[in-house]
Image (cartoon, grey):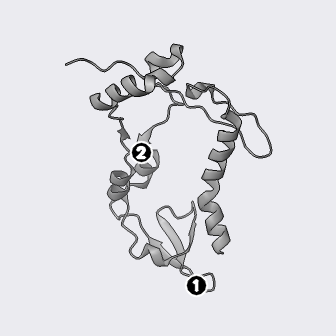
Amino acid sequence: MIFRIYFRRRLCDACFGMLKKKFRKSDVNAVKLVKTDNSAKCNGSEVYNENDDDENSLKWYRWDNFFTKYFKPLRGIGKFHHFRFTSDEVGVVFARETLDQPEKRLALLKESTNVPELLKTLPEVIQPAGLTEERMRYLYNEVRPFVQYNFRDEFCPRASEE
């Protein structure tokens, strides 16, 4: 059991290590240049567009406000180790503390929740704040010399002068 938990926590580190090996002696100055072939070790890469208006762009959602509006908190979640959800009962989770104990049916959906509305709704999109002026000056002065010439303006633009 301890090995399985350890392995799951380190799986992302292992994949990052494979990327480091593959691109160790390569110049990769843009996300669009990171492409991996399909192999037995890797399922391939997903490249997201950087344009906010595109449906394939990576978006961050404000899930905390969304869940607070529609769901009740699950008290004592740390004592449960086995969870089951079903599409037949939206907003209900079946939980067990151990495998040999019976399941507990826990209704998490608030009574005032309109389920059809919930299924069509997405939370608010979080807009990234961008780089601070101090960080932009650091990138321009310290990092820019190490970036290939044709990518310098994209990754280390000059900070606006005050």
For the residue carrying disc 1, how many other residues have a C-alpha within 10 Å: few (<14), some (14-19), or many (20+)? few
Calculate the distance from the C-alpha at mark 2 to the C-alpha at mark 1.
34 Å
Residue type of the residue flagged with mark 1: Pro
Residue furthest right as drawn = 40
Quadrant in which the N terminus appears: bottom right
Q: Nearer the viewer, residue 141 or 19?
A: 141
- Percent x, y of residue 110: 36, 64
In this rendering, position of residue 25 left or right of residue 104: right
Mark identifier at residue 102: 1
In this rendering, position of residue 140 left or right of residue 150: left
- First along the sequence among labels 2 and 1: 1
Q: Is residue 19 above or below residue 90?
A: above
In this rendering, position of residue 143 left or right of residue 98: left
User: SS of the residue at dot 1?
Assistant: loop
For the residue carrying disc 2, how many other residues have a C-alpha within 10 Å: few (<14), some (14-19), or many (20+)? few
Q: Which residue is mark 2?
A: 121
In this rendering, position of residue 154 left or right of residue 23: left
